[in-house]
Amino acid sequence: MPLSGLFIIGIAVATNYATLVICRFFAGLFTGPAISVAGGLIADVFKVQDRLLVITLIVVGPFLGPSMA
């Protein structure tokens, strides 16, 4: 995730199209594994009774962030 954050900063300061495309590729490359294992991680860490709240917060986060910004 820290590497992904660095490439996201690279996207923000990109001055040409090639830099933008390369930084977006690497940001997605380093973020993808974290997103794909999130469901299994929640199932392993939290009890069945607590999963509903955790999954709700994870799903609501990406939708709530832009609307609050």
Image (cartoon, rainbow, N blue to C red):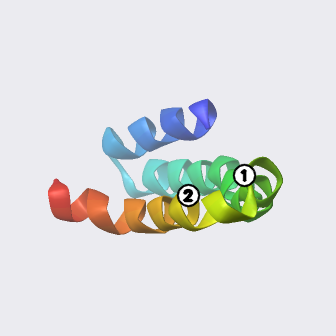
Horizontal side of residue 7 vs 14, given as left or right: right
Q: Secondary structure at mark 2?
A: helix
Location of the N terminus (image quadrant): top right
Say what amino acid the circle numbered 2 marks. Val
Q: Position of residue 28 (x, y in %)?
A: 61, 56
Q: Are marks 1 and 2 in contact (CB under 8 Å)?
A: yes
Structural crowding at the residue carrying mark 2, measured as other residues with C-alpha within 10 Å and reported as few (<14), some (14–19) or many (≥20)? few
Residues 69 and 23: in front is: 69
Residues 38 and 14: in front is: 38
Horizontal side of residue 9 vs 49, given as left or right: left
Pointer 2 residue: 54
State the residue at coordinates (36%, 50%): 16
Structural crowding at the residue carrying mark 1, measured as other residues with C-alpha within 10 Å and reported as few (<14), some (14–19) or many (≥20)? few
State the residue at coordinates (34%, 69%): 63
Image-quadrant location for residue 9 = top left
Say what amino acid the circle numbered 1 marks. Phe
